[in-house]
Image (cartoon, rainbow, N blue to C red):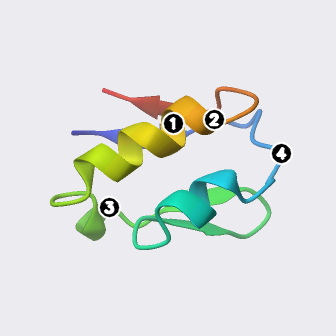
Amino acid sequence: MNVRVEDSCIACGACESICDAVFSIEDKAVVNESAVAGNEDSVQEAADACPVQAIVVE
């Protein structure tokens, strides 16, 4: 699973509140790539919850 955050991220923190093992907020959400494996369901939930659809899961 590849995860990236687009520049449209508004740093609202929704993804971090759902899956703080993978997402952290700086100027925008940042992905901890090494934590994606094993957290796929939470990553997808965070992507679905993003209010601006800035999280892309491939």
Is residue 38 shown left or right of residue 24?
left
Q: Name the residue type under label 1.
A: Ala
**Contact check, label 1 and label 2, Cβ < 8 Å:** no
Where on the picture, by quarter, is residue 39?
A: bottom left
* Label ID, residue 33: 3
* Label ID, residue 10: 4
Where on the picture, by quarter, is residue 41?
A: top left
Residue bearing the label numbered 1 = 47
Q: Quadrant of the N terminus?
A: top left
Give the Cα distance between marks 1 and 3.
15 Å
Q: Residue at x 75, y 28 (%)?
A: 52
Q: Name the residue type under label 3.
A: Glu
Specify few, some or many for label 1: CA neighbours under 10 Å numbering under 14, 14-19, or 20 or more: many
Residue 26 spot, x, y in % from top left: 73, 70
Q: Name the residue type under label 2.
A: Glu
Could you tell which of marks 1 and 2 lies nearer the N-terminus? 2
Query: What element does badge 1 sit on?
Result: helix
**Contact check, label 3 and label 2, Cβ < 8 Å:** no
Q: Nearer the viewer, mark 1 or mark 3?
A: 1
| Relative depth, front residue between 21 and 27 | 21
Q: Nearer the viewer, mark 1 or mark 2?
A: 1
Work out whether 38 lies above or below 40.
below
Q: Name the residue type under label 4.
A: Ile
Q: Nearer the viewer, mark 4 or mark 1?
A: 1
Specify few, some or many for label 2: CA neighbours under 10 Å numbering under 14, 14-19, or 20 or more: some
Work out whether 36 lies above or below 3.
below
* Label ID, residue 6: 2
Give the Cα distance between marks 3 and 2.
15 Å
| Relative depth, front residue between 4 and 39 | 39
